[in-house]
């Protein structure tokens, strides 16, 4: 295989949380990218319609032949998926992967953008997908970045309650990374690294290694900090999901160095691949939250 960096890129499931930021990161460096959107999606309206490097096409996400035809027509080498964990979004990744394989796509970037998924329990669908995509011989690049900084107010129910809720003591270190850093990193390595560095690889990045307790201290007493066993449910949507996320943080699973097979965390591994973006200054949680 040629060691010339990839030149043609497409993205599916481009929503506001990570997909659109990735598209913006490609456009910021002047690299063309194709958005394959659902027929009713309005997410691309957040992007500059007059940018010559942006192309949007519509497709039925359940139709493998339709997706494959689009990928072939546009000679796509790399397909990025940012479908959401909720609402069955991950189920369509199998359709995307099979279509990509049929179309001759050289690299598939699945929707990870968190920590290494366990084989059972929460997020096990990501683990199952990894098995499937390996079975069809489609190379992948899996990006682990821990917790997105922007989700901290949601994760702690601060947005709804005005209080910063922490499960237990909140003293377990984890990986926290800003969305612009994740998006910029993805665009940077896909356009600068040789294919041999990206095929069937897991990259682990970390903007800041910190704890929930340390983050709460950034507010300097401006909001009450509540230590609890579960997040409040009154007026807090998906409180059980947030509690589950914090339970994972509380046992070390929010670290990009966490190994779901051994249950151990390697702090040195957590930001091991930050070096692929040489000279970049990573944002802190305080930077992102304006603290």
Image (cartoon, rainbow, N blue to C red):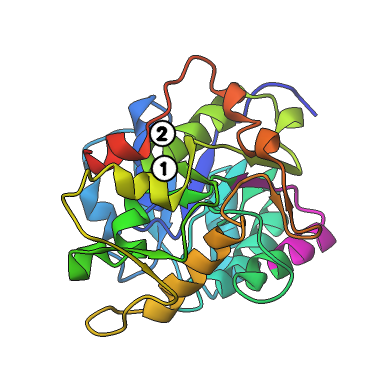
Residue at position x 29%, y 34% from top?
287
Q: Residue at x 30, y 79 (%)?
A: 237
Q: Residues within 10 Å of mark 2 (few under 14, many from 20)?
A: many
Q: How many marks?
A: 2
In the image, residue 39 above or below residue 193:
below
* Residue 185 spot, x, y in % from top left: 50, 32
Q: Identify the disc placed on residue 22.
A: 1
Write down the residue under mark 2: 26
Q: Position of residue 86 (x, y in %)?
A: 46, 74
Q: Where residue 244 is drawn, which disc sits there?
A: none
Judged left or right of residue 119, residue 227 is left
Question: What residue is shown at x 73% (from left), y 59% (from top)?
Answer: 260
Q: Is residue 141 magenta?
A: yes
- Residue 16 visible (yes or no): no
Q: Is residue 35 on the magenta stretch?
A: no
Element class at badge 2? helix
Against 31, residue 98 (above or below) is: below
């Amino acid at each position: 295989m040629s060691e010339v960096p990839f030149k043609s890129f497409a993205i599916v499931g481009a929503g506001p949380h990570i997909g659109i930021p990735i598209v913006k990161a490609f456009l910021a460096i002047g690299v063309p990218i194709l958005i394959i959107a659902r027929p009713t999606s309005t997410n691309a309206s957040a992007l500059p319609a007059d940018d010559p490097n942006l192309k949007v096409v519509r497709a039925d996400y359940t139709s493998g032949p339709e997706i494959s035809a689009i990928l072939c027509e546009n000679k796509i080498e790399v397909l990025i998926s940012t479908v959401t964990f909720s609402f069955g979004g991950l189920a369509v990744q199998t359709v995307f992967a099979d279509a990509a394989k049929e179309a001759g796509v050289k690299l598939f970037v699945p929707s990870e953008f968190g920590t290494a998924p366990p084989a059972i329990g929460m997020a096990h669908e990501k683990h199952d997908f990894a098995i499937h995509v390996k079975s069809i011989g489609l190379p992948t690049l899996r990006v682990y970045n821990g917790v997105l900084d922007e989700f901290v107010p949601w994760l702690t129910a601060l947005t709804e309650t005005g209080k910063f809720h922490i499960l237990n003591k909140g003293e377990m270190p984890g990986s926290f990374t800003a969305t612009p850093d994740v998006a910029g990193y993805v665009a940077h390595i896909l356009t600068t690294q040789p294919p041999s560095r990206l095929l069937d690889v897991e990259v682990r990045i970390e903007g800041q290694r910190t704890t929930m307790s340390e983050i709460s201290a950034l507010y300097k007493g401006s909001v009450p900090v509540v230590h609890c066993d579960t997040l409040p449910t009154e007026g807090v949507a998906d409180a059980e999901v947030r509690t589950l996320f914090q339970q994972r943080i509380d046992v070390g699973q929010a670290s990009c160095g966490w190994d779901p097979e051994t249950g151990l965390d390697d702090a040195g591994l957590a930001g091991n691949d930050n070096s692929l973006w040489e000279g970049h200054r990573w944002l802190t949680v305080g930077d992102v939250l304006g603290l």
